[in-house]
Image: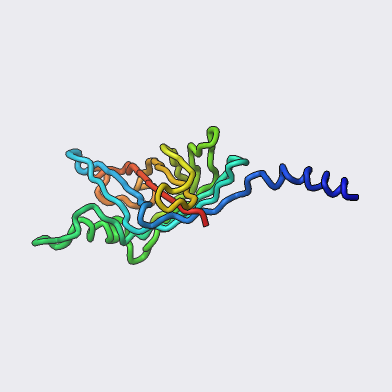
Amino acid sequence: MKKFAVLAVAAALPLAAAAAPENYTFDPYHSFVNFAVDHVGFSTMYGRFNKAAGKMTVDAAAKTGSVEFTIETTSVDTGDGDKGGRPRSRDDHLRTADFFNVAEFPRMTYKSTGVKFSGDNATELEGQATLLGVTKPVMLKVDRWKCGPHPFSKKAMCGGNASGTIKRSDFGMKFGVPAIGDEVKLYIGFEAYKD
């Protein structure tokens, strides 16, 4: 009987050693959604959202994962929040119904439907973005990916950079097109601590 118990434990060890899905929560101080859009053909305008929250799950052994995050649209910031002598600042305008319509749609979301891996690294996120009440598929390329202990806190963390492109008119944001670019480039930097 003792020999059988030892064999049963030995047989179960590979299953116990297999990695299980691990959950992570975005660090709000080091996770931002940035964007770039052509501005009347003369320059590229850059901005970001200062408030975002998210969670992700990573199963390193199975090479699977998921991610979802929520962006507070009222936190849009292009560096022009002071109206001065103008009727409104650019950031104020972006919050109106011409663009993000934050009164009616205070949040936009992204939820992955699939994560592709190459070796140990996530390389692509397929998912659904919801903006202005419209949901569309959006693919994000994972440009950088790393999991390991944080160098200062020593807590387990995963993080990286992702990028993609959307057409804002696909979501009903048509103000100023084509003078103000329809194509918006997204750059997402994220760090997430293991729960």
Query: Can residue 135 be seen by looking at this rendering?
Result: no
Percent x, y of residue 34: 32, 48
Q: Residue furthest top?
A: 119
In front of the other: 176 or 107: 107
At x 87%, y 46%, the residue is 3
Of 32 and 98, the residue lying toward us: 32
* Relative height, residue 140 to residue 107 (above, below): above
Question: 169 left or right of 195?
Answer: left
Residue 94 appears at what percent x and percent y? 26, 56
Residue at 49% across, 46% down: 127
Residue 69 in the image: above or below residue 13: below
Tell which residue pokes out farthest to the right in this image: 1
Color encoding of the figure: rainbow
Q: Residue at x 23, y 52 (%)?
A: 78
Q: Nearer the viewer, residue 104 or 49?
A: 49
Visible residue check, residue 35 = yes
Seen as rendered, the residue at the extreme bottom is 103
Q: How many marks?
A: 0
What is the x, y in percent for residue 110?
Answer: 45, 52
Residue 131 location, quadrant:
bottom left
Please give left or right for residue 118 compared with residue 27 in the image.
right
Task: Name which residue lies at 70% across and 47% down.
Answer: 16
Residue found at the far left of this picture: 85
